[in-house]
Amino acid sequence: MRDGRKSIFAATPESLADWFRARGQPSYRVQQVCEWLYARHVLSFEEMTNLPATLREALAEDYQVSPLREVERLCSADGRTVKLAFEIAGGARIESVLMRGGRRPTFCVSSQAGCAMGCRFCATGAAGLSRNLSMGEVIGQVVALACAAGEVGNIVMMGMGEPLVNLDAVLPALDAMADPARFGLGARRITLSTAGITPGIRRLATARVQPNLALSVNSPFDRQRTELMPINGRYPLAGVLEACRGYAQRSGRRMLLEYVLLGGVNTSQKAARALASMARRLHAMVNLIAYNPVTGCEYKTPEDSETRQFRATLEQAGVAVTQRFRRGRDIKAACGQLAGRPSAEH
Ligand code: SAH
Ligand code: SF4
């Protein structure tokens, strides 16, 4: 928190109701405030013009609106991708991405400043972890993106950080996204991506809001996966996949397996066949992502023929495959490129 006041994004409608009641205010004030925040995306109390001025001042004494300070906004050459950078209390930077193009925009949201998982191909991992984001900081990104987009998009928790090691903030943020009194998004419109934190997946399976779950596989072989993603040493594939199976059963959702194609590294036919059988056992879809270049990483973007062949092997095995667009590479907003550094330093 910038100045000791709590962000209003971290307040539940119930806690706001208590706050208004304590001031002798009618309960419809909660709806008024929620409407301003979550439907109209205002970022100051002064703009909440249907509240009496004294009440707006009282709110501002106890709460700040957003705990985030926007410090940079970059738009891709095609105008469809916008990267927002924010400074958070303590001075770290986080990034969020707005992608337009589909029926609805997609909001890519961060869960941590940096990341402790150290995946070898990821700019966020290279920087290490600064700190966990609070629930208000997660929701602050959604409101800022909604403000930029003019509407609430689908949300993917695929920005900086590993969401399943910050569930104390992520679970209440999921509640806010799904709550009809706040953003009112169906859980189907929210996707959370994880590097594979077995206890986190189990905990998510018992949460109130169960988003689509995407697992970053990146290699179907434990030895190689541990090289690429050190967290696999702690949570090897078998246990992760077992937890995913439990999640799919409980949530009734189909899992998504993400696979970053690293040219010449994890694109063999053997890997494709092993990934296909993993996907079939889980009834999961596969999302292929071409490696996006990261400064200091020696990996290569795959050749088109390499990608085609890998995809064909999956499809021949009966697996549903999608391929992720390389959106926003020119502004370092593509998957794995969020480093939280000012653009001049990239
Ligand atoms: N920590 C979570 C979510 C954030 S990373 C996770 O790892 O799943 C989101 C996705 O970006 C992951 O699937 C990850 O494998 C992918 N990614 C990381 N670095 C990348 C890069 N350089 N190019 C393409 N995708 C990358
Ligand atoms: Fe962290 Fe995900 Fe990047 Fe791995 S890929 S370092 S888990 S953000």
Image (cartoon, rainbow, N blue to C red):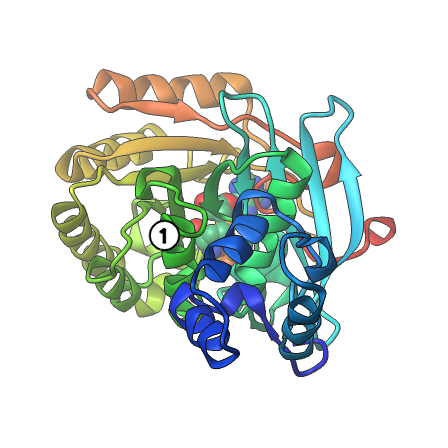
Front residue of 249/51: it is 51
Q: Quadrant of residue 114?
A: bottom right
Up/down of 195 relative to 148, above or below: below
Residue at image point 13% right, 51% down: 250
Whether residue 119 can be seen here? no
Give the residue displayed 36% in from the left and 45% down from the top. Answer: 219
Up the image or down, 19 lies above or below 191; here it is below
Amino acid type for the residue under numbered disc 1: Asp
Q: Is mark 1 on a helix, strand or loop?
A: loop
Query: Which corner quadrant holds the N terminus?
Result: bottom right
Q: Which residue is drawn at 62% across and 61% down?
A: 126
Q: Where is residue 215 in the image (x, y as percent from the top left)?
A: 34, 47
Left or right of 196? Residue 266 is right
List x then y, in percent, for residue 132: 54, 71
Q: Which of 50 and 288 is in front in this view?
A: 50
Q: What residue is rendered at 43% in x and 17% in y?
A: 308
30 relative to 143 in the view: left or right: left
Among all residues in the image, which is located at the extreme right? Answer: 344
Residue 125 falls left or right of residue 75: left
Q: Can the viewer see residue 149?
A: yes
Q: Depth check: 299 or 45 in front?
A: 45
Which residue corresponds to mark 1? Answer: 179
Query: In the image, is 174 to the left or to the right of 30?
Result: left
Residue 39 position within the rendered picture, expressed as x and y whole percent measured from the top left:
54, 43
Q: Position of residue 65 (x, y in %)?
A: 65, 64
- Give the vertical position of 147 relative to 226 (above or below): above
